[in-house]
Image (cartoon, rainbow, N blue to C red):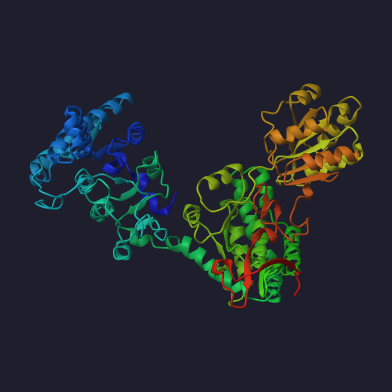
């Protein structure tokens, strides 16, 4: 739970205010889907023991829509030929709409087995202390009976001539009414539902506007630029902010959030960092998180541009310094890593996760070696990829360049931080890293060690470490600053990120890797390959998860030898329909399953083409292997299997950036756009075009004679 939302744990009585822009559609008709979702949320809150009070707008809009229809139904053909002005009296609209609105709420709540009640008030009523006491007593009685009170200002008999005029100053719209009721009825929280996510620093339609998660009066009062008011309500966001400030600083916290998202009230009460919170103690919560997302990304971009102007030798020196720093700080790194491992074991994490978490001495040594390998790599930035003479004295060059700023969200593996940071330095990119909480200490010490080796001319903000999970949604909205997101983790993590960002996402969701043993396989070689593919590092994404075996091996003893090899290594076996019956082992619940442990699935297939079909149907396009001495069968497998990496007579564990000679890897991509397979330096580069001319202008192409001649890359 976000620290700024801790107070929701003690909330019992909540006032929810829903505005006209939420309860109606753009054409003025009721938004029945949103109203239904609202009622379902309030029903759930009611069932969970919350005391729920609803303040609703929408009566005037609903009444106007109904009166328009009535006039249309009663009009003659000649009446319809004349202009149809909107001359309905607002108070008549309110009177007609109020009964319709309450009837709708009553119907919806009745379907959910909830009882609701109507309370119409005017601002003048609140001058009377006896009324206020009676109001409080009535609401308390209703709440004790689990009845939901529904409040609305009685616009039908209001004496106010126009919004904010002739008002007693007690309240002047349903937002301020909600704020007043929250204080009067001693609510623990006021939720104001809007047609946008919350309060922005400027008009929400402006791409430069950013969502303010915590309103701090001293900071934001003079910084915010309000846009147009709501299309239907009286005051829009200005009215909501005024009401929220009044209520919050008088003692009732307020959260403004979107009423368009079907479960936002529940999410607010679960402490999620959505919307904008107003709280009298908000000024005490000021910390780096409020500025971390955009400012961290912008700082990484600025630092990356300083890194790019360094020579290749200077960037290599930085990497060599990083490698030295890793080795010189090995004891400190291991100490922090061991603390993470102990905490993970105490929390009952799976063995596969703990295995990925460990940084043993040989791992640190290997990381330093891979960083030095990157330092010795040929300069990747500014390489001329293509040169073309467009016309006389007009030369076009396509050159390699960094992507910009990359956000990496990874789980469990702190060694990934080192690899990714080294790749970013070599490729001239800025970097934001968010690791899993289980590796918090390891990530922090590695980040400190690496950034200490970056010279001041570049700045340690080149690589930003994101420590708060709540910052991720903000980062994923920064498509104007962050150029690529690389998630390294579970299928769930990757899917969530893809669903919540406009930034391009590169990665793989599952590592369902297959090894197919053909009838012409060398069985001793096959045993060696499957042993390595499954047991060398079972938690790796390139470990074998499914073993496919040609049917002939089930009759000549080959299958038995392979099974014995795996069982001797402690591998737990699950079978497909054919293998489970033949081997008398448990049948797998799904072929699309990543064990990430000493377990794998076995199935019998008729031939290489059946194996290919199985891989295409159940695989994840990661890494596949065929073991066979038949070159034609091998070539058919290599050509037809549509995965990022396909091997012949070699373990799937070779699918790795360092083993491929890339120095390190950001991750393994199974997507088909940009980079595919292990992603090293080249996967973090794009290109741009440089045109060198001598005063040429297009001028309708009249004065240019195009040659389009390919030129040598080296000048």
In the picture as drawn, the residue positioned furthest to the front comes out as 702
The vertical placement of 40 against 713, above or below, is above
Q: As drawn, is 559 to the left or to the right of 700?
A: right
The vertical placement of 310 against 514, above or below, is below
Question: Residue 582, image x and y in percent?
Answer: 81, 22
Q: Where is residue 395, by image quadrant?
A: bottom right
Residue 109 appears in view: yes
Q: Residue at x 61, y 69 (%)?
A: 451
The vertical placement of 332 against 594, above or below, is below
- Which of 429/524 is in front? 429
Q: As drawn, is 134 to the left or to the right of 650?
A: left
Question: Residue 445, image x and y in percent?
Answer: 61, 63
Give the position of the C terminus as an image quadrant: bottom right
- Which of 210/364 is in front? 210
Question: Residue 5, image x and y in percent?
Answer: 39, 50
Question: Residue 653, image x and y in percent?
Answer: 78, 48
Residue 625 appears in view: no
Q: Residue at x 73, y 46 (%)?
A: 542
Q: As drawn, is 707 to the left or to the right of 660?
A: left
Q: As drawn, is 557 to the left or to the right of 547?
A: right
Q: Residue at x 86, y 26 (%)?
A: 554
- Which of 360/451 is in front? 451
Q: Where is residue 26, by image quadrant?
A: top left
Q: Residue at x 67, y 64 (%)?
A: 422
């Amino acid at each position: 739970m976000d620290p700024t939302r801790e107070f929701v744990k003690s909330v019992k009585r909540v006032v929810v205010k829903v505005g006209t822009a939420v309860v109606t559609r753009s054409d003025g008709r009721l938004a029945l889907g949103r109203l239904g979702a609202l009622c379902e949320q309030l029903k759930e809150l009611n069932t969970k023991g919350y005391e729920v009070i609803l303040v609703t707008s929408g009566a005037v809009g609903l009444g106007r829509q109904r009166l328009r229809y009535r006039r249309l139904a009663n009009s003659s053909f000649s009446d319809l030929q004349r202009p149809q002005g909107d001359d309905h009296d607002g108070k008549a609209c309110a009177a007609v709409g109020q009964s319709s609105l309450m009837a709708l709420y009553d119907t919806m709540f009745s379907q959910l087995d909830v009882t609701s009640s109507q309370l119409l008030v005017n601002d003048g009523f609140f001058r009377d202390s006896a009324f206020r006491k009676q109001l409080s007593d009535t609401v308390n009685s209703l709440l004790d009976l689990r009845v939901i009170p529904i409040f609305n200002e009685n616009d039908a008999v209001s004496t106010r001539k126009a919004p904010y005029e002739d008002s007693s100053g007690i309240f002047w719209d349903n937002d301020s009414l909600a704020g007043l009721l929250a204080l009067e009825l001693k609510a623990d929280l006021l939720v104001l539902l809007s047609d946008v996510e919350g309060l922005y620093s400027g008009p929400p339609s402006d791409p430069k506007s950013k969502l303010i998660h915590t309103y701090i009066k001293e900071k934001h009062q003079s910084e915010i630029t309000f846009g147009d008011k709501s299309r239907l309500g009286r005051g829009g966001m200005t009215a909501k902010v005024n009401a929220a400030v009044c209520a919050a600083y008088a003692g009732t916290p307020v959260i403004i959030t979107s009423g368009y998202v079907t479960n936002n009230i529940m999410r607010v009460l679960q402490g999620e960092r959505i919307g904008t919170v107003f709280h009298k103690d908000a000024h005490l919560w000021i910390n780096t998180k409020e500025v971390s997302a955009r400012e961290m990304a912008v700082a990484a971009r600025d630092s990356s541009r300083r890194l790019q102007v360094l020579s290749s030798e200077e960037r290599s020196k930085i990497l060599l310094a990083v490698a030295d720093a890793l080795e010189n700080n090995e004891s400190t790194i291991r100490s922090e890593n061991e603390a993470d491992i102990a905490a993970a074991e105490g929390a009952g994490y799976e063995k596969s996760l703990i295995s990925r978490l460990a940084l043993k001495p040989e791992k640190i040594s290997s990381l330093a070696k891979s960083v030095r390998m990157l330092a010795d790599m040929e300069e990747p930035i500014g390489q001329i990829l293509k040169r073309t003479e467009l016309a006389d004295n007009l030369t076009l060059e396509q050159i390699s360049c960094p992507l910009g700023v990359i956000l990496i969200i990874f789980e469990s593996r702190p060694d990934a931080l080192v690899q990714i940071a080294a790749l970013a330095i070599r490729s001239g990119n800025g970097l934001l890293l968010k690791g899993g909480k289980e590796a918090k200490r390891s990530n922090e010490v590695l980040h400190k060690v690496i950034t200490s080796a970056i010279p001041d001319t570049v700045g340690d903000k080149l690589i930003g470490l994101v420590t708060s999970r709540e910052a991720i949604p903000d980062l994923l909205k920064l498509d104007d600053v962050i150029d690529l997101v690389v998630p390294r983790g579970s299928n769930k993590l990757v899917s969530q990120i893809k669903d919540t960002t406009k930034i391009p996402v590169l990665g793989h969701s599952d590592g369902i890797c297959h090894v197919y043993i053909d009838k012409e396989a060398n069985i001793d070689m096959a045993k060696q390959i499957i042993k390595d593919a499954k047991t060398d590092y079972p938690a790796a994404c390139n470990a074998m998860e499914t073993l496919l075996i040609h049917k002939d091996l089930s009759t000549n003893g080959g299958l038995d030898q392979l099974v014995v090899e795996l069982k001797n290594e402690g591998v737990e076996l699950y079978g497909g329909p054919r293998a489970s019956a033949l081997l008398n082992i448990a049948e797998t619940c799904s072929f699309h399953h990543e064990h990430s442990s000493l377990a794998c699935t076995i199935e019998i297939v008729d031939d290489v083409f059946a194996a290919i079909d199985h891989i295409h149907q159940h695989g994840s396009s990661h890494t596949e292997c065929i073991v066979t001495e038949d070159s034609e069968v091998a070539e058919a497998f290599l050509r037809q299997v549509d995965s990022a990496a396909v091997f012949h007579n070699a373990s799937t564990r070779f699918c790795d950036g360092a083993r491929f000679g890339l120095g390190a890897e950001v991750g393994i991509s199974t997507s088909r756009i940009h980079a595919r397979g292990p992603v090293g330096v080249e996967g973090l580069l794009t290109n741009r075009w440089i045109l060198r001319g001598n005063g040429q202008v297009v001028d309708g192409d009249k004065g240019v004679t195009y040659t389009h001649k390919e030129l040598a890359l080296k000048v």
